[in-house]
Amino acid sequence: MPTVWVLGAGQLGAMLKQAAYPLAINVEPVEPESEQLPNIIDGDTVTVEREQWPDTPVTRHMSQQRGFMNADIFGKIADRFHQKTMLDTLGINTAPWRSVEVNTKAESLHAELGPDVLLKRREGGYDGKGQYWLYEDQGDEVPTDWLGTGIAEKKIPFNEELSLVGARDKDGNKVFYPLTLNLHSNGILMASISPLSRVAHLQPMAESMLGKIMDSANYIGVMAMECFRVGEQLIVNELAPRVHNSGHWTQAGACVSQFEMHLRAVCDLPIKAPEVRGQSVMINIIGVEREIAWLKIPSTQCYWYGKDVRPGRKLGHININHPQKSAVQTALNELRKLLPENYQDVFNWVEKELKRI
Ligand code: ADP
Ligand code: MG
């Protein structure tokens, strides 16, 4: 088995490493700022846990390797201008948008995109960072540091946010997990729920959208597509050419997790339709110290990333999975008591959504 080198050494790389063990694949996450170049040899594979990376000796070295998967696509997806252009070219529904040029005026953005316009940095934004709302009724101008560095999007009055995680192998075979319902707060993912029978009728549409994107890029590995649901329509918000936070529930709720699926695809091992078991809910741990009592709750898996605790930072996640929804709810009730006040809304949302699945 080859070594799979992962550009980036955060929690996604660590979870890829964990998933590699039963396949006897050696996964080596690499810190982009590291002073030591990874010893990549012929036959090794290079993949990523992030689509944006600084220009360092390590990133230059890794991206020049023959085994660097999907080399052509990262630049396109990492820059929202190119990502949105790609979606438009493929005829895939996405929020109407304009490029913010050095001379773009708020007035013209509002004329084309409506009274509320969301500016997004072309590169580097994540977890809602790198966004700026421009409100016509407040007479906002485009801040100077956004000129030439962003795109502007129409505000989508979505019913809810759904994501699809899929994988494609080198022969073009594709597999998908069921659509996942996501709750964001201030742009950061707080909770995911999957599967949901009430959105199952949207699954074929979502699969054909993501399938078309992956095919067009000759993509190999796991890709995630974040969508807005507006009525019966899906509108693509953004793409991630990697394993994705909204797929973490697959660690507990699918026979092959998104992490293992990605490794299978990039190592040219068979990918297979992931049989999903029971009901899954994932709760992200944001800015909260670890609590040992979480480990006692039945039907849960706790992941703690070992990062320094900072407000708003993703520090871990808890997967809850059980064949019966009532047992999932019982675990949520226990967990609710162990998380801070600001999580009440999250648990209320999950409880409400579990009832209408
Ligand atoms: P990030 O890279 O930070 O995840 P996103 O583009 O996914 O950036 O935006 C983060 C969140 O902001 C989304 O999950 C959604 O809740 C909200 N959002 C993004 N774009 C729009 C839009 N056009 N209209 C309304 N809400 C949006
Ligand atoms: Mg997003």
Image: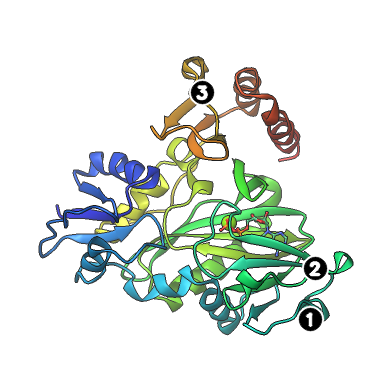
State the residue at coordinates (59%, 60%).
130
Tell me the amino acid under the disc marked 3.
Ser
The spot of residue 167 in percent (x, y) is: 42, 60
Q: As shown in the figure, which amino acid type bears the numbered disc 2?
A: Asp
Which amino acid lies under the numbered mark 1 shown in the image of this protein?
Glu
Q: CA distance from mark 3 to mark 2?
A: 49 Å
User: Which residue, given by chain and number where applicable, does mark 1 sit on?
Assistant: 112
Residue that lies at the very extreme toward the front in this rendered image: 144
Give the residue at x 69% y 60%: 228
Q: Is mark 2 within 8 Å of ligand 1?
A: no
Q: Quadrant of residue 171?
A: bottom left
Q: Nearer the viewer, residue 96 or 234?
A: 96
Q: Quadrant of residue 345?
A: top right
- Out of 331 and 125, give the one closest to the viewer: 125
**On the image, which quarter does residue 335 sit in?**
top right
Image point 19% across, 71% down: which residue?
Answer: 66
Query: Where is residue 143 shown, x and y percent of the image?
Result: 69, 69
Question: What SS does tag 2 mark?
Answer: loop
Q: Nearer the viewer, residue 92 or 73?
A: 73
Residue identified by numbered label 2: 140
Q: Which residue is mark 3?
A: 299
| Dot 1 alpha-carbon crowd within 10 angstroms: few under 14, some 14 to 19, many 20 or more | some
Task: Examine the rendered structure and indicate whether residue 300 appears above or below residue 155.
Answer: above
Closer to the camera in the image, 190 or 90: 190
**Label 2 Cα crowd, 10 Å radius (few <14 / some 14-19 / many 20+):** few
Residue 268: image location, x then y, percent = 25, 61
Q: Which mark is residue 234?
A: none
Q: Is residue 103 visible?
A: yes
Regarding mark 3 in the picture, which secondary structure is present there? loop
| Number of numbered tags placed on the structure image | 3
As measured in the structure, the alpha-carbon distance from the residue carrying label 1 to the one carrying label 2 is 16 Å
